[in-house]
Amino acid sequence: MFQYLITISPLGFMYGSSGGFLSPENLVGRSGAKFPPEAATLSGLFFSTNKVKSYISPKELSDNLFVAGPFWAKSDDPEYFYVPIPWHKVVAKKGVDQWKMKSGKWHREFEDLDPDYSWQTVNSWDNSPAVIKKNGDIADIPWKYVPILHPKTKDDERCTLAEDGLFLENSVQMDDECCLVYLSTHALVDGWYRFGGENHLVEIKSIELPNDSPILKLLRQPIQRSFALIAPGIWGSNKFSYRYPKNEDFSQKRPEMLTDKPISYRYRAKGKMGRGRYAVPPGTVYLLREPLDKTWWEFPENWFPKEGFSLKQVGCGLCLPIEIQGVE
């Protein structure tokens, strides 16, 4: 089980990637902009830090390090961090709605109501959209994109090169009162680190989770017929990425889904860039024909791709049980 919250507070700007499949023609655009960094980035930091000053057995890290995220929180209350709102809950500024099962089909009252919020506090996970909104357990993202133009000058003049003399960095500025949050089975030594693309400086702290923490209570609950992702989901083999595990013990339950378009997902392992994939986005809701009766920790590793290590170790498909009206 996860034992720590890893909080990451930027000391200035952070890097906002333009997505996992960047092309020279799309350097300026923010189509597919990707922030915060995936949990795999934090996993890599564990291994690189441990190489410099070994405090955990390398085999222990390889076999037993699990991280998950990204999430975010108010810096003064990181235990009650924000997670993606499941897609069956619609929370907008002008009202709320909820997807239900009616006569075997998805149904909601206000079809033209689009969600304005996509993050809720983890301790409000089981609450209805109306209660979440009334209690103020929703929030807008606490970061904004800030483009920074970097010049590359000539060696003997303070002038940019005639060709390739400029590079646009899609930086991100976090709210000073907020921080990024990741779950981890191991602690990282508190301090300042270079983190993410462009190696921007951040302050990292490890906070031990109490046994009654809201996230641990939720993760201990076995999933029955419905659950929602709180981290990107990648299922299937090393060659293909599926919307759900194709193993017989899962696919025979014939899941129905509420989801959005896939998101790009890429990571670096052992100094090499993994091949680009598409992931099922956080917030995706799965409704199964039969009860699963497993927690995420009990999901078999063969449900996840394995490229040097199982993608389950970087929190892929991390999910929590939910209740959907009309589902027994």
Image (cartoon, rainbow, N blue to C red):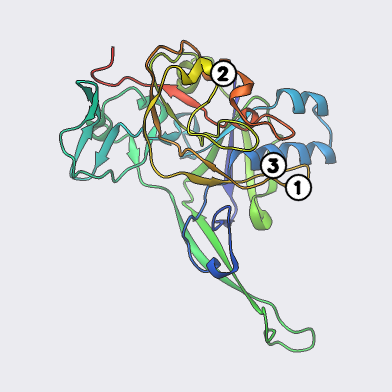
Q: Cβ–Cβ below 8 Å for labels 2 and 3?
A: no
Residue plotted at (50% across, 55% down): 33
Q: Earlier in the sequence, mark 3 or mark 1?
A: 3
Residue 57 visible somewhere in the drawing: no
Which numbered dot is residue 272? 1
Tell me residue 284's x, y (percent): 40, 33
Q: Which mark is residue 193?
A: none
Label 1 secondary element: strand
Q: How far is mark 2 from mark 3, CA to CA?
A: 34 Å
- Label 3 element class: strand
Badge 3 vs badge 1, beta-carbon distance below 8 Å: no
Label 1 or label 2, whichever comes before in sequence order: 1
Query: What residue appears at the point 43 percent right and 34 percent down from the top-left corner?
Result: 83
Looking at the picture, which amino acid does disc 2 mark? Phe
Closest to the camera, between mark 2 and mark 3, is 2
For label 3, the residue is 191
The image quarter containing residue 8 is top right
Residue type for callout 1: Lys
Q: Which mark is residue 299?
A: 2
- Horizontally, residue 31 falls left or right of residue 113, namely right
Tell me the quadrant of the picture where the N terminus can be found: top right
Q: Quadrant of the C terminus?
A: top left
- The secondary element bearing badge 2 is classed as loop
* Vertical order, 193 against 88 (above or below): below
